[in-house]
Amino acid sequence: VVGLKQITIEVACSELRHRVLDEGTFVKFLKFIIRFKRRHPEIGEKEDGLMLQSITFSVKGVDAPLSTFKWFSPRNLIPSSLPMTIDTLPREISDLFTSKELQKELGWFQPLPLVRWLNSVDVGLIISNSAQRDDLFVFLNEEFKNQRNAPREVICPALLARLKEIPCIETNQGLRSPSEAHLPAVTEVFPDLPCVTSRLLRDLKLSSSFLVSLGVRNSVSLDLLFSSLEALRWDKDQSRLIKYLAGTQESLKREELARLRETKFLRSLGGQDDSLFAPGQLLFPSADNISLGLKVLERSSKKPLAPNSSEGRFLKNIGLRVDPELDELIESAGEQSLEPEKRARIILFMADHVESRYQSYKPSAVAVGFLPTDQGLQKPLSCFTCMDCKIMKFAVVEESIRSAALRLGVQEHPSSDLLVARLLETIHQLPVPEESLLIAMFEYLSGRMRYFDGAQWKLLKREPFIPSNGAFRRVSEVYLGSHQTVNSHDSSSLFEIVNFSGSANAFIARCGVREQPSLDEICTLLASDPKFVLSVRLKGDVDRYLGILRQVSSRFGELSGEVIRKMRKSSCLVGLRRRQDGASELCSSSQVSLIDDTLLEQLFDPLSAPLETGLEKLYESLGAQWISKETARTFTIVGEWRSTPISIELTQLIVERAPLILDGRKNPRLLASSLFPNKLSCWVVDNIVANLSYRASHSKQEVTSCVLPAKGVQAGLNLFVVEQFDFFDVGQALGNHLFDQCRLEDAFMISRMLETPLDVLKSRGFPVDRVLLQEPTPKVKISPPKGSLPAEQSGSVSPSGTHITSPQASSSDSRSSSHRLAGAGEPSLEGYTEILSNMFPNQDPRHIRRLLENESKDHLIAVSNKLADEAAHQESHNDEAAQPTTPEPAGTLARGKESRRTQNSGKGISMERFMKSIRMTGKPGISQGLGLRGTTSPAGVASPPDVLSQSVPSRGSDPALDLSHQNRLDVALQTGIRSCKPSQGPGSISTDDTLRPTHSGAELTGACEIVPGHDLVNFPVPTEYSSLPVFIRRRGDERGLGMVESVFWDSCEQFTLILRSLCAIFKLDSASVSIYYDESGRTIAFNAGRSIYCNLRFFASLHRHLPPSDPEPIFYWFIILCHELAHNFVVEHNAAHEHWLESYASRYLPGLVQFLAGQTRPSS
């Protein structure tokens, strides 16, 4: 605005010189000056002086120039109720500003020093006001605590001196000077003395040290104490009296000490009345004695009273006891009214000192029950410490004193005789079976089975004690089932199944309960009348019905074909209506759909299968179809086909990412496609409509992408997208072509592969290097369609001139190559790829496949040699990089390896003779069980190619080639051994891993059949044995172990020594080998998930009784392990498997011979 001038300090002072500012205006003025100085830092002392002399403001009706105020009181320094000096800025003004604003930015005021305030304050005036007096003492007490090391340097000495002369200490007799007042510790002994009131100590929280510094007394003379000893009556703290007495004990006469021993003048800790005790009736107030709840000397002092201290020696001299007596402790702990915590502390104290102070303690001599149990107080020999004994109705000590009870002679468990007697006693007392109680008893008894003898087992087999259908059954009347099956209420039902828990089942199985009915019987019941099973036997519980189906799914491979056909025709499955809050109904496999596309489920709301992998496999095996396969799709393409930058870029992106999408190791459900991506064309259209038909229901849905086959002479694929397409729709369209069954996760995976940058994919573990190292992406040449096309068209026809050129061979050539590989009786290209991938897990399967396609004959041998060369070269390269080599003369390496082979062959045992002797042996399970064959195949089976002879160089070949072949074979064999995995227990054995021999000869049947994991029970190894993990197969005809338990574990021990010795020969981790016992099965050993399981029954029957000098057991199980290691490469029993078996045997036979030369048979 024209004419206005900026205000200055001079103008402001001139304006305010003749005015008196009120408090609010003054505050605003100060804030204005602070802001003004921040903007004008050049303001100096001249302007400050002018303002101090010019400004006057009113404080509580009194006008005061600003220049009279030099100080301000910092917040929380001096209580607001105490008066300030006249040159201190009023608190109601200074509290509105920070110390920095008043001291630094204004520069007019300084913090008020405490010493100045103390010297200037009118103490008499403050003392006369009770409220101000309290505030003053509280303030001085805080300053005393903050400056404990030098209080008189902060608190003015003159002020302290004045306080000592003034009656300022509040006592029970009015205000007294500090020298006349006493602390409560003194007046408790001498109640007539003036005592500082509790208000000062408790309410104002004045410390005793502060009061003493003012002059308050905390002691009296010793003469006064003795003159008043008989008349004393105190009710709080007697420690000061004891301290006085201990301090004068040297001057006490013998008569005076005797009088103190007999006088009841001491109080006990925690006494409820005014009772006094003589010293001999009390114990020292030690931590142990106090925790025991015994009568101890009362002591309020926090400092412990040591027996060897001055006070402790005095108290012992007049009769105070240090330790309690044993009988006193037992009697005290046996009082029914004693608090449980105190009783527990007494018991723990006794246990801690039973071997030192109370060596005379004997559990059998205790006549009083003092141990707390769930059945009241018991003697040491009438209770036990294991909490599980409660189930058997035995008295069990409380958990808090369990360890102490053991030291006091309490046993952990009852004897086996007591356990059996208590079980049968409980059975006779129950009018009807209480299943939960009996199950708990069985679970406990399962942990005590090792202590039972033959007489007790026979007794349990005779007595009915197993609850079933409201009655007690003998072990021969029930089955041990693994299914949640409920029998009808008719006592003459087909079978009674009991299933309690793992440990309870183990106990009744040891008693003699047989296995559950077969799976065929249960499924036949389901197929014959599923409504009866659900409504009557399961009482309408659908979850339990689904539980049965889950069990059937896990063991589906055990069902007979006849039962499966019945289930396919029956409405024995459960279907869900998810739109109806998951309503369920029984249905057949033809009525239910498997859900692999939730969008289709939302559109059609079918009767769907539960979303569980196991149940889906069962439903599919019984004939149910996936909803994506049941839904027919056609697409309506709207608009002209256009080649745009979007379509070109999308085509190049798909071609670039195709190796990642087609990575077979990531998804084995990928189909082989000769059209993707090399014959894929991409077009942009206006709109795409998907026409969906599911059974009798139809729906239309707009999508942003679809794939249709090209119509015409040349095969191809057309990918249609709209301008604003969704990568997920693109992924789903490609997935429908690439996958046998495209799921939502497949479509999502493809879409993420396309839209995620390569560096992000690489950081997440995808093999991006395959994309970066592949051949250059073929250029896409797209010509626009000639002529005009209809605006709307169903299906797809590739326009002429539209194609994708690629330098790769055509798919027909690849197909013919694949057909050449897959000759009659030989594995296909995929089979060879799988075999070589198992042999060389670090190699890319795509690389292996390319090498196979380049071979015209002997594909497996030729490619395995090449891959072994690559692995050996890589290993040699790594060794050279890690360790420098020393130059050798030419031929040294070859001579060294040749000499090693010569040494191996110098043992006098050739591989041919050794294998021949194995084939000719008559021991059961060798030729029949392992499937080792001679040159003659079984009748009706074509002779497989001699893989072993093909892989061995012919006579007269170059020795260097022989050595190269041996090196490659060594690499493959060691790789197979390193691929073995530690056993994860029976839960890791899947029925999907069951070996299915490709030949039907009798010699291949059953020898390596995997025992399903749910048929194996973990058998704990006793601590006195060091056996490998042991499992037992459960069978309906099994009766215990089939041998005495001690003999069983001795056999396991011997078997373990042999297997561990063989593991050392093979350099195989012994954790990957386990023992299992199958009393009637034909399986000698099996390989499941690259873990090996060996049947103890064959060792026990064939080799356990042989003398240690007999090498047959080590030779026998050496071939067994060779056989199972060969399964790491080949699942089937064929020529390739025999090749790897004989390769293992020939490679590690020298090590076996060296082992036998040093020790004929492993022994403990």
Image (spheres, rainbow, N blue to C red):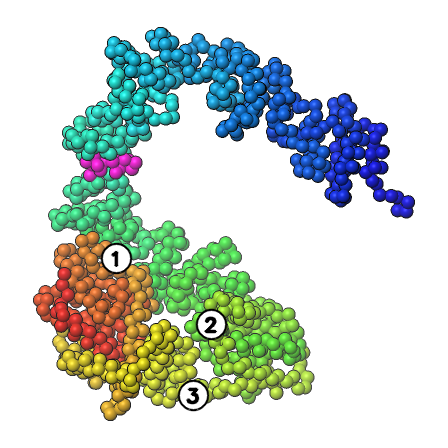
Vertical side of 438 occupied by 662: above or below? below
Q: With 762 as the anchor, is 68 left or right in this view? A: right
Residue on which disc 1 sits: 1018
Query: Farthest residue in the right direction?
Result: 3
Numbered disc 2: secondary structure:
loop
Residue at 26% from the left image edge and 60% from the top image edge: 1016
Residue at 61% from the left image edge and 30% from the top image edge: 76
* 927 part of magenta stretch: no
Q: Earlier in the sequence, mark 2 or mark 3?
A: 2
Query: Quadrant of residue 110 in the image?
Result: top right
307 or 992, which is in the foreground?
307
* 399 part of magenta stretch: yes
- Give the number of callouts: 3
Q: Position of residue 944 (x, y in %)?
A: 27, 84
Looking at the image, do the residues carrying marks 1 and 2 touch, with CB atoms under 8 Å apart?
A: no
The numbered dot on residue 816 is 3
Q: Residues within 10 Å of mark 2 (few under 14, many from 20)?
A: some
* Magenta-drawn segment: 391-411
Vertical side of 239 occupied by 518: above or below? below
Q: Marks 1/2: CA distance?
A: 40 Å
The numbered dot on residue 767 is 2
Q: Closer to the camera: disc 2 or disc 3?
A: 2
Query: Quadrant of residue 142 in the image?
Result: top right
Residue at 76% from the left image edge and 36% from the top image edge: 48
Q: Earlier in the sequence, mark 1 or mark 3?
A: 3
Q: With 290 as the anchor, is 765 left or right in this view? A: right
Q: Position of residue 996 (x, y in %)?
A: 30, 73
